[in-house]
Image (cartoon, rainbow, N blue to C red):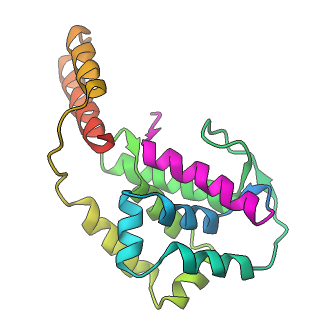
Amino acid sequence: MSLIFTLRSRRVLEMAETVAKDVGRDYIAPIDLLLACTRIDGSLAQSILNDLGILDVALTQHLQTLPKEETKVYVYPLREIKIGMNEASRRAITHSQASATEQGLYYIGTEHLLEGILQTKDATVLKVLANYHILVKELLEQIQAYKTLPKPNQPETEYSKRVRQTLKKTKPQTPSLWNQFITHIQEFLETIK
């Protein structure tokens, strides 16, 4: 099953690319993804990190002190990015896809990306979290708590209205699967409003 990235998740990937280029790397590392999560306003990942005191400025300073490492770069085929990812970043994306799938979702949110970053147990990310006296296990538990919070009611956008109308016009091949599909699309639309 192919999952899609939410708008904010795509922005995290684009921001990670910018962060990597700013420090002179031609690939995205998990620390770039973590820093990008702190920079996307309104994202669930940013809320979780900010609640723990992990802020953009401090992470940026820490990132600049890290030695440049030589690592094999894998080009991970995502439309959202133009440069490669190292193996740990590729695993972070894979873990985030698994997390979203476990929830029965058809999209990858910033909370899934953050969870994927943590599950890679990348040494640089672990060092940064240790500076904040944060254990990965505790942060993963906090992410789970955030993911179970109910979504706030938001007004429907013109885009979501058009999608709902299109879905109603399309005839289902299997009614039960179709109903599940509609439910997941509606949940996805609520997250991007």
Q: Is residue 71 magenta?
A: no
Query: For residue 176, what is the image quadrant?
Result: top left
Whether 45 is drawn above or below 49: the answer is above
The percent coordinates of residue 141 (x first, y second) are: 32, 74
In-front residue for pair 118/6: 6
Whether 112 is drawn above or below 125: the answer is above
* Quarter of the image that includes the N terminus: top left
Whether 164 is drawn above or below 183: the answer is above
Which secondary structure type mostly characterizes the magenta part of the structure?
helix
In-front residue for pair 186/16: 16
Left or right placement of residue 178 versus residue 137 in this view: left
Furthest residue in direction right, as rendered: 70
**Which residue is depicted at the point 60% across and 84% down?**
127
Left or right placement of residue 112 versus residue 186 in this view: right
The percent coordinates of residue 173 (x first, y second) are: 26, 11
**Which residue is depicted at the point 50% across and 56% down?**
95
Left or right placement of residue 67 versus residue 172 in this view: right
Magenta-drawn segment: 1-24
| Residue 123 visible, this orientation | no
The percent coordinates of residue 53 (x first, y second) are: 41, 82
**Which residue is depicted at the point 80% across and 55% down?**
26
Whether 141 is drawn above or below 184: the answer is below
